[in-house]
């Protein structure tokens, strides 16, 4: 008998990637196929670069990418029968208004093994992010969850609004923005006070979270006027009064701000994490791609003759990674550097070097080639010294030229290449600019990110960019200026933390 696969019904939570469970993240890393809903945070798919990803759902009011429940069931069955590990990634919790029960029953009927991985439900998480406890012993000892994704005016309703209206405590409505007016009228008709507090939370737990407050008599009108769209959770009851005191998520200093970062994909995570900690919505545009050199021979040859060197200078983490990867492949380790001195530019470069077992001899306070050169010159006579610079193929000439002018011998090898962004990245950037939402800040960490970012823009477009440009250092700022673009701020410390601090300054 042919071996069958396994289907995992995984709850993705309400949106914030940090609310994905450890079990869910682990299964994504193992998956062969991921069948996901539209409301799932797309960043969760990055846990699983190896998996085939199939969108199986649509947002309310949109027909594109629609797949019927029958089609989804059959898809899960077909993939499982191929002996695949299938993750069915569903927004919120699979068994809370998520049709997870239907999918599990279908798999059971056809003899497919499945596992349910509960997720953080939007029913309590979204109100929590808005500062609303759905229960509080001072006013609400019960909470009722209702799907409002139907017309309360239809002849036969699956929800008994008369009984719902009579219930004490908090009422939490999933979905149902289109029927909100009819629902509130029904609740008032069946005895709920028209002054009962109501809060509607759009895109809860995400940086774009928006909150509309009112009461049963006014909330539908306010929601329509504000243009709130799905996904949204509605909270009805006295617990809404605690929001004024307990709201925390919207208090973050960068809440509601959209920030575009232009670092290479491999470098972006640290900056993204820092910005998201302060509430920003982070968009990524890898303005550069980091690739191996076309030929490793020059670096390999240098590694075989390290004893002839006096200094190695690492100007980036990529140079460190490339050097030590080739060192390992040659059968050597950090011990061969025992007789050499090592200089670095940058805190991150120094940290990575320390992880390789090497403490740098020199690191300038300012993370620039100019500062490093001045520091080297102040420490010893450079004449006759032999330096190795494992760098990018487009490295500025300043450091090499300055050392040679002092009488040093410099061997410069390409340890990695810095390439323009991919076509996919450029298409993604164009899509960002076409959105109705504005980009508040654009960050640049190097001159090359500036070059590649503006390379494809017409001058008229560059002049009309409203975003605030924030740079990591003077070289980057100067490059920005060469495009006729005004710098908003420059980081005092040429680090990721310094860049974030520059944005946070008031």
Image (spheres, rainbow, N blue to C red):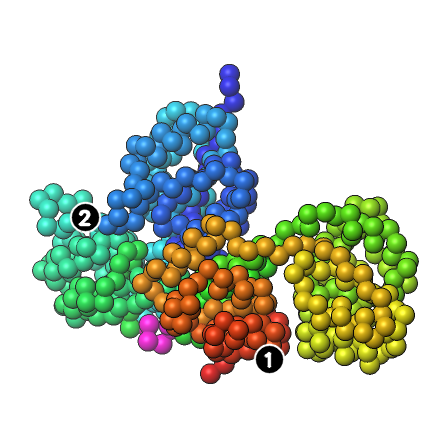
Q: Are marks 1 and 2 in contact (CB under 8 Å)?
A: no
Residue 471 can be seen, yes or no: no
Residue displayed at 48% across by 38% down: 52
Disc number for residue 450: none
Q: What residue did someone put label 1 on?
A: 492
Q: Position of residue 13 (x, y in %)?
A: 41, 52
Q: From the viewer's perspective, tell me whether residue 129 is left or right of residue 350.
A: left
Q: Residues within 10 Å of mark 2 (few under 14, many from 20)?
A: some
Residue matched to label 2: 150
Quadrant of res 229: bottom left
Is residue 372 located in the magenta-colored stretch of the structure? Answer: no
The rendered magenta stretch, by its main secondary structure, is classed as helix
Q: Nearer the viewer, residue 403 or 341?
A: 403
Distance between the alpha carbons at the discs numbered 1 and 2? 55 Å
Query: Quick one: 235 or 205, which is closer to the camera?
Result: 205
The secondary element bearing badge 1 is classed as loop
Residue drawn at point x = 11 percent, y = 43 percent: 156
For mark 1, does the 10 Å Cα neighbourhood hold few (<14), some (14 to 19), or many (20 or more) residues?
Answer: some
Q: Nearer the viewer, residue 144 or 30?
A: 30
Image height check: is 405 above or below 288?
below
């Amino acid at each position: 008998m042919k071996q069958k696969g396994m289907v995992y019904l995984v709850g993705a939570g309400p949106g914030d990637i940090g609310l994905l469970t450890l079990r869910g993240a682990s299964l994504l890393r193992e998956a062969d196929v991921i069948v996901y809903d539209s409301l799932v945070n797309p960043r969760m798919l990055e846990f699983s670069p190896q998996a085939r990803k199939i969108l199986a759902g649509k947002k309310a009011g949109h027909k594109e990418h629609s797949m019927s429940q029958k089609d989804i069931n059959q898809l899960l069955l077909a993939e499982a029968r191929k002996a695949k590990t299938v993750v069915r990634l569903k927004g919120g919790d699979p068994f809370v208004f998520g049709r997870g029960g239907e999918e599990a029953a279908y798999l059971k009927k056809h003899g497919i093994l499945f596992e349910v991985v509960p997720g953080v439900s939007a029913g309590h998480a979204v109100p929590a992010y808005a500062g609303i406890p759905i229960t509080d012993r001072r006013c609400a000892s019960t909470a009722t969850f209702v799907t409002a994704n139907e017309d309360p005016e239809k002849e036969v309703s699956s929800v008994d609004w008369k009984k719902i209206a009579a219930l004490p405590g908090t009422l939490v409505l999933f979905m149902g923005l289109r029927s909100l007016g009819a629902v509130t009228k029904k609740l008032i008709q069946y005895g709920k006070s028209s002054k009962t507090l109501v809060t509607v939370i759009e895109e809860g737990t995400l940086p774009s979270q928006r909150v509309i407050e009112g009461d049963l008599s006014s909330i539908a009108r306010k929601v329509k006027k504000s243009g709130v769209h799905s996904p949204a959770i509605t909270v009805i009851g006295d617990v809404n009064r605690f929001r004024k005191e307990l709201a925390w998520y919207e208090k973050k200093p960068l809440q509601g701000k959209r920030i575009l970062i232009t670092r290479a994909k491999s470098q972006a995570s640290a900056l993204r994490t820092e910005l998201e900690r302060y509430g920003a919505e982070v968009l990524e545009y890898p303005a550069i791609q980091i690739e191996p050199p076309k030929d490793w021979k020059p670096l390999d040859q240098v590694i075989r003759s390290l004893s002839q060197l006096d200094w190695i200078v690492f100007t980036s983490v990529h140079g460190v990674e490339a050097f030590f990867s080739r060192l390992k492949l040659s059968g050597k380790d950090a011990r061969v550097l025992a007789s050499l001195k090592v200089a670095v530019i940058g805190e991150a470069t120094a940290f990575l070097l320390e992880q390789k077992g090497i403490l740098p001899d020199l690191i300038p306070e300012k993370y620039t080639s100019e500062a490093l050169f001045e520091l080297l010159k102040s420490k010893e006579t450079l004449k006759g010294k032999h330096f190795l610079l494992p760098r990018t193929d487009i490295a500025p000439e300043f450091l090499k030229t300055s050392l040679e002018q002092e009488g040093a011998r410099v061997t410069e090898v390409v340890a990695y290449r810095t390439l323009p962004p991919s076509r996919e990245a450029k298409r993604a950037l164009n899509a960002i600019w076409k959105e109705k939402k504005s980009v508040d800040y654009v960050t640049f960490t190097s001159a090359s990110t500036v070059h590649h970012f503006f390379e494809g823009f017409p001058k008229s477009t560059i002049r009309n960019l409203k975003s605030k440009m924030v740079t990591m250092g003077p070289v980057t700022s100067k490059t920005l200026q060469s495009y006729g673009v005004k710098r908003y701020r420059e980081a005092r410390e040429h680090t990721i933390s310094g860049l974030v601090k520059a944005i946070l300054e008031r």
